[in-house]
Image (tube, grey):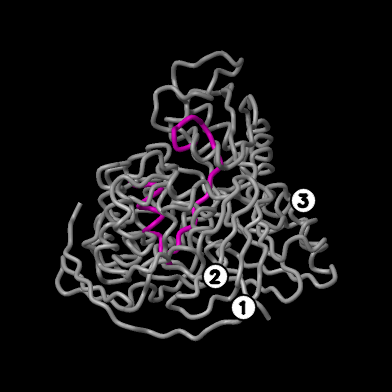
């Protein structure tokens, strides 16, 4: 890991005040912890961003803006100067200092039992994309010390941020209550009080909005959009996102827990290690049918980021649905009669996640595999099990706040290295030296066009080896009642910062 010196100073910026109201937000997925550094997952970050802040912020189009840092510049190849915003106070009244930033960046290197660590964000600070990397880390006060734990945050004792809202109470599996922070540097927060109501059942969440029990909901199912669009005093907001849904395959272990022989008996070899088998599985999947018939919206994917983002490779198109080619690839790989496989997916993480697992299971069955089952689990359980490598084939998603492919390639596909934080979300431990070399070159390339080409080249290496099977990019929906509005955003972010009042 290359290290850089980072210098901090402070400056003051004033932000206008906003109108005050109350908000009850019906969320599909609950955070796993109030600790903002515990997991880099959408549900955790959406909750954390109300109470804690980052050095930078990202708007609805994923463009980078100042946050707790107001400016930054490269002094020499290994030295950055970052100016912190002056006058920022934590919820306990203490001042934000450089020591708090340093403490926060160091702490994320080793968070015990994290299902999605932030460690990749601090893996290479001597890089042109420094602020996009360390900018993902939420800042907490250094006085919390080295022994602060999840329980301290969950009880509210350590839930001390600089954000517009302060922790009041968390009742797990029910709700989280937040109060406006009157000392927020950004002025008067939009809402005086916020209640995040956790409603994992899609029908119940929609009914809660229509009945007026909640003001805003996320995770709106495409099938519910026509009903919500025509309901009285109800509004629907949507956007094509950069969240990739993909199928991860256990391609590195000699045996895999949910791979069997065609007759269900144990196998002492893992067919997923063979690239032709992975190619076959990709060609068994009808992405167009999934998007159009199962989801009612989305875009078939053939790589990590969609067109328009840095590092997109225009020649990488989604694999065609071709059952005959799939069967031929299986036979060529030595599995003419297929093998047994169980597919795992979440049940409450994103619209249609359970249905996607079922659809892939049916397609694999038609393609010559023996699908032993499809298991859909609550995300809080599912994510931890996936990170612990308990599955053989599982549906997951990735959406970064960056406007290029670097973050996804670094965290999801780079060779897993807990020392540097690279590959922190590489749950199948895929590894390719050529890929890592190209990614390393991109990390230190200051010319944007050259950097994007290196990222595209790295993506080509990963996709040719079927490091994962891209499925589609999600189309996202939120809905509200009355005067409450929501700004749909490419990052699939259900943070209250995107909620407002007409």
Query: On the picture, is 167 further left or further right than 173?
Result: left
Chain part drawn in magenta: 386-414
| Residue 20 numbered tag | 1
419 to the left or right of 382: left
Disc ID at residue 292: none
Residue 128's place in the image compared with 440, above or below, is below
Q: Quadrant of residue 193?
A: bottom right
Q: Position of residue 143 (x, y in %)?
A: 30, 57
Mark 3 vs mark 2: which is more N-terminal?
A: 2
Residue 407 coordinates in the image, percent (x, y): 38, 57
Per the rendering, the mark at residue 180 is: 2
For the residue pair 404 and 327, the one nearer the viewer reads as 404
Q: Nearer the viewer, residue 7 or 251?
A: 7
Secondary structure beneath disc 3?
helix
Residue 204 is labelled as 3
Q: Secondary structure at mark 2?
A: strand
Q: Earlier in the sequence, mark 1 or mark 3?
A: 1
Residue 277 in sight: yes
């Amino acid at each position: 890991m290359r290290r850089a010196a980072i210098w901090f100073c402070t400056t003051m910026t004033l932000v206008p005040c906003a109108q005050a109201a109350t908000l009850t937000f019906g969320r599909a997925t609950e955070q796993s912890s109030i600790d903002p550094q515990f997991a880099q997952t959408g549900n955790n970050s959406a909750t954390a961003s109300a109470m804690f802040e980052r050095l930078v912020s990202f708007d609805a189009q994923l463009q980078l803006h100042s946050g707790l840092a107001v400016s930054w510049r490269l002094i020499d190849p290994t030295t950055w100067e970052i100016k912190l915003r002056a006058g920022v106070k934590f919820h306990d009244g203490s001042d934000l200092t450089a020591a708090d930033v340093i403490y926060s960046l160091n702490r994320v290197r080793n968070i015990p039992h994290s299902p999605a660590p932030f460690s990749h964000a601090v893996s290479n600070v001597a890089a042109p994309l420094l602020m996009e990397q360390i900018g993902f880390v939420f800042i907490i006060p250094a006085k919390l010390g080295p022994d602060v734990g999840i329980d301290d945050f969950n009880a509210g004792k350590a839930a001390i941020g600089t954000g517009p809202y302060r922790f009041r109470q968390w009742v797990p599996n029910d709700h989280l209550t937040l109060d406006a922070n009157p000392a927020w540097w950004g002025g008067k927060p939009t809402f005086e009080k916020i209640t995040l109501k956790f409603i994992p059942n899609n029908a119940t969440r929609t009914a809660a909005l229509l009945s007026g029990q909640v003001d805003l909901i996320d995770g709106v199912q495409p099938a519910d959009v026509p009903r919500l669009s025509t309901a009285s005093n109800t509004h629907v907001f949507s956007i094509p996102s950069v969240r990739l849904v993909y199928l991860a395959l256990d391609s590195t272990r000699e045996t895999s827990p949910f791979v069997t022989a065609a007759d269900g008996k144990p196998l002492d070899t893992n067919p997923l290690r063979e690239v032709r088998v992975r190619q076959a599985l990709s060609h068994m999947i009808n992405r167009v049918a999934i998007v159009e018939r199962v989801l009612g919206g989305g875009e078939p994917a053939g790589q990590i980021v969609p067109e328009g983002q840095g590092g997109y490779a225009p020649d990488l198109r989604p694999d065609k649905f071709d059952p005959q080619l799939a069967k031929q690839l299986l036979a060529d790989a030595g599995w003419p009669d297929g093998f047994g496989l169980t597919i795992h997916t979440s049940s409450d993480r994103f619209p249609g996640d359970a249905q996607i697992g079922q659809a892939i299971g049916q397609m694999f069955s038609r393609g010559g595999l023996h699908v032993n089952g499809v298991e859909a689990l609550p995300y809080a359980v599912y994510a931890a099990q996936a990170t612990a490598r308990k599955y053989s084939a599982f549906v997951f998603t990735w959406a970064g706040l960056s406007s290029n492919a670097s973050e996804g390639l670094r965290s999801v596909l780079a060779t897993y290295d807990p020392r540097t934080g690279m590959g922190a979300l590489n749950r199948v431990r895929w590894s390719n030296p050529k890929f890592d070399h190209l990614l390393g070159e991109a990390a230190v390339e200051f010319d944007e066009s050259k950097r994007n080409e290196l990222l595209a080249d790295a993506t080509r290496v990963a996709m040719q080896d079927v490091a994962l099977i891209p499925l589609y990019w999600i189309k996202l929906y939120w809905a509200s009642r009355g005067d409450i509005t929501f700004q749909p955003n490419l990052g699939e972010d259900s943070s209250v910062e995107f909620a407002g009042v007409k």
